[in-house]
Amino acid sequence: MIDYRLLQALAAVIEQQGFEKAAQQLCLTQSAISRRIKQLESVLGQPVLLRSTPPVATAAGQRLLNHLQQVRQMEAALGLTDDPEHMVVRLATNADSLATWLPQALVLPDQPGVQFDLVVEDQSVSLKRMKQGDVMACICDVAQPVNGGAALYLGALRYRAVASQAFIQQHDLAANLAANIAAAPCLVFTQDDLLQHQYLQDIAGATPQRVHLCPSSEGFLRAIQAGLGFGLLPELQVQSYLDSGALLDLSPGYALDTPLYWHYWQTESPLLQLLRQRVGHTAKQFLYQT
């Protein structure tokens, strides 16, 4: 059985970004904190920290931190603590939600002490974080919950295929989109991002021939504006650019709707329940409710 004092020492080092401040927080000496970390690593038989500046949790260390947060959730659910000041909510989300509607949902006026640790993953793979126990909640496009979890349908994030006027002219897309689009360079967020592949299959029965990997929502948009390639972006993010003519819709009337689900553990604390309700309410305002 793990001594939770050791986990608290690990959490303090990560949260305070160093051994000295962690010692101050726990009213211990710096050497005592160091001994507890070494004892934890001895029990596990592997390191839990990378001794960098600031220290960084290893994969094993991160799983322990998430376990500690789940214990704190259970304590809060049982009324054993009502202190949200030390609650760090580790959440996996897709970048496009983070770039559009999600930040508004994370504002909890009645819980100003809550801290978020946001892990950005493609919506098609972020559920693996729940399965590994790395996060306390996640947003993904899979409806089936993990063991011990539940899922709430949030709505669909609508994507449109867009490009700059110069790009369209350069690649002769206005005259014959279906014939020329596959040879034109496209932007892809990561290797897990298959939205562009789906679009090309639907429009031209083809797959991308030239791809630029661009793992940044803001960079993705800027690259399309500059004419580096075409790509699919959330309607929420590009509607103003379409209205102004800064970007053009390659296939008016065509849209890809990606369903999004909020996955959470059934052992839910009042804080996580409040967050789920807030996320669900905000999603109804911004996402398509299909």
Image (cartoon, rainbow, N blue to C red):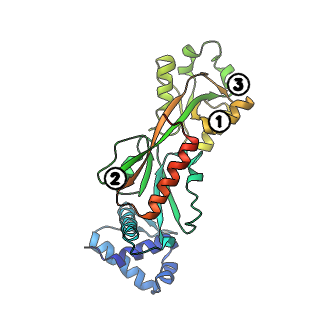
Of badges 2 and 1, nearer the viewer stands 2
Q: Is residue 112 left or right of residue 9?
A: right
Q: How many C-alpha atoms fall within 10 Å of the one at disc 3: few (<14), some, or many (≥20)?
A: some
* Disc with the residue nearer the chain's start (2 vs 1): 2
Quadrant of the rendered structure where residue 64 is? bottom left
Mark 1 lies on residue? 238
* Residue 45 picture location, percent across and down: 27, 69
Kind of residue sitting beneath label 2: Gly
Quadrant occupied by the N terminus: bottom left
In the rendered image, is residue 148 in sight? yes
Question: Residue sitting at 55 percent across and 33 percent down?
Answer: 159
Q: Give the residue displayed 53% in from the left and 45% down from the top.
A: 283
Q: Is residue 237 above or below residue 128?
A: above
SS under mark 2: strand
The Cα–Cα distance between marks 1 and 3, rounded to whole angstroms, is: 15 Å
Question: Dot 2: few (<14), some (14–19), or many (≥20) neighbours within 10 Å?
Answer: some
Label 3: state its secondary structure: helix
Circle nearer the viewer, 1 or 3: 1
Q: What percent of the width, then of the height, locates residue 60? A: 35, 63
Residue 18 x %, y %: 50, 74
Left or right of 213 on screen, residue 62? left
Crowding near pointer 1: few (<14 within 10 Å), some, many (20+)? some
Q: CA distance from mark 2 to mark 1?
A: 34 Å
Label 2, on which residue? 149
State whether residue 211 is above or below residue 91.
Answer: above
At numbered mark 1, what does the secondary structure look like: helix, strand or loop? Answer: helix
* Above-or-below relation of 119 to 250: below
What amino acid is at disc 1?
Val
Residue 48 in sight in this render = no
Q: Quadrant of residue 219?
A: top right
Of the numbered discs in the image, which one, if any, rests on residue 165? Answer: 3
